[in-house]
Image (cartoon, rainbow, N blue to C red):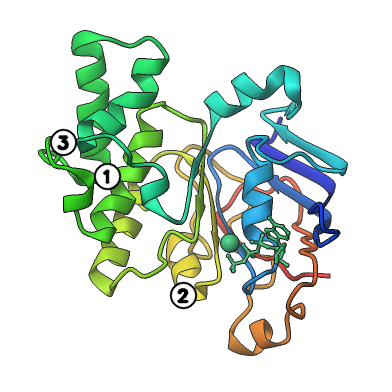
């Protein structure tokens, strides 16, 4: 079975020589919901930027649905992989929320009632029906973050990747976002240093909706407070070793050696 996402031996250093990723292996099966945990500076956001080719590895490979992420496949990879950045304002720039959600599908050629239905469905999926006419900057941070998720859901991606989705959210907004994400029938990678949230989104022992059978036990080594404190020193590159070809939601420690 071809994994939804596969990284093998990925290494990346920024132009100033800072090594952010060093030997990252990760495999995510279709239907899985996986949390990648790591302390500040571990390389999580750098990893995210490799998942749809914004950055390309200096060694190793990234494959999406079996296709290597490279210049020739970039358009297809970006159709399949949706990134939700930490700051929703990076994804909300139109006068209204509906315009923002319509932006991607309209660019892909959708028009008229089909486009309106796509926008309505995406807003419904994130629990913001009826807010399409609002200006994004009039929404709360929690609503803006869910609106940012809607902008990518409207493109019907195969893999949803969220970078620090709970940053600066209050408990109610965290819960609302968790309800949205767990209700989606979508392969999801959540990058965070929020262990409780990772465990909430990717609870041990729950199988993904789309797949029957397979492993049900969460694995990897989630870092608790002690583990996080014992994680890589600031500036140490992320080295991830996730077990391969699993079929259950899981939490993966980004500082595994
Ligand atoms: N544009 C850049 N140029 C040089 N170094 C960078 C750049 N962006 C990130 N880095 C460095 O790469 C390493 C990984 O950074 P990254 O932002 O991927 O970490 P992170 O795990 O997402 O951190 P955080 O939890 O704070 O978001 C860090 O040492 C960081 O200083
Ligand atoms: Mg980051």
Residue drawn at the location 21% of the way across and 59% of the way down: 140
Identify the disc placed on residue 232: none
> CA–CA distance between discs 1 and 3?
12 Å
> CA–CA distance between discs 2 and 1?
21 Å
Classify mark 2: helix, strand or loop: helix
**Disc number lying in front (1 or 3):** 3
Q: Height in image: 55 above or below 101?
A: below
Residue drawn at the location 50% of the way across and 66% of the way down: 198
Horizontal relation, residue 64 to residue 13: left or right: left
Which residue is tagged 1?
Answer: 126
Q: Are marks 1 and 3 in contact (CB under 8 Å)?
A: no
**Front residue (pair 99, 253):** 99
Label whose residue precedes the other's in the sequence (1 or 3): 1
**Front residue (pair 64, 211):** 64
Which residue is tagged 2?
Answer: 196
Q: How many marks?
A: 3
Q: Height in image: 82 above or below 119?
A: below
Residue drawn at the location 26% of the way across and 64% of the way down: 173
Which residue is tagged 3?
Answer: 132
Measured from the top left, where is residue 254 in percent x and y? 70, 66
Residue drawn at the location 35% of the way across and 59% of the way down: 178
């Amino acid at each position: 079975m071809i994994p939804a996402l596969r990284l093998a031996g990925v290494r990346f250093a920024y132009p100033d020589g800072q090594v952010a990723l060093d030997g990252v292996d990760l495999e995510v099966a279709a239907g899985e919901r996986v949390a990648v945990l790591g302390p500040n500076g571990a390389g999580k956001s750098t990893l995210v930027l490799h998942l749809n080719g914004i950055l390309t590895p200096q060694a190793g490979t990234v494959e999406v649905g079996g296709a290597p992420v490279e210049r020739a496949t970039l358009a297809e990879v970006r159709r399949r992989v949706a990134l939700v950045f930490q700051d929703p304002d990076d994804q909300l720039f139109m006068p209204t929320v509906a315009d923002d959600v319509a932006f991607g599908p309209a660019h892909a050629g959708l028009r008229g009632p089909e486009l309106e239905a796509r926008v309505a469905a995406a807003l419904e999926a994130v629990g913001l029906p009826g807010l399409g006419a609002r200006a994004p900057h009039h929404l709360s941070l929690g609503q803006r973050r869910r609106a940012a998720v809607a902008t990518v859901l409207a493109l019907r991606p195969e893999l949803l990747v969220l970078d620090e989705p709970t940053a600066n959210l209050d408990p109610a907004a965290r819960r609302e976002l968790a309800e949205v994400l767990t209700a989606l029938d979508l392969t999801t990678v959540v990058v965070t240093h929020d262990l409780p949230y990772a465990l909430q989104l990717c609870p041990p022992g729950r199988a993904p909706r789309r797949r029957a059978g397979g492993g049900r036990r969460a694995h990897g080594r989630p870092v608790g407070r002690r583990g996080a404190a014992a994680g890589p020193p600031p500036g140490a590159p992320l080295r991830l070793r996730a077990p391969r070809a699993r079929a259950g939601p899981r939490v993966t420690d980004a500082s595994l050696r």
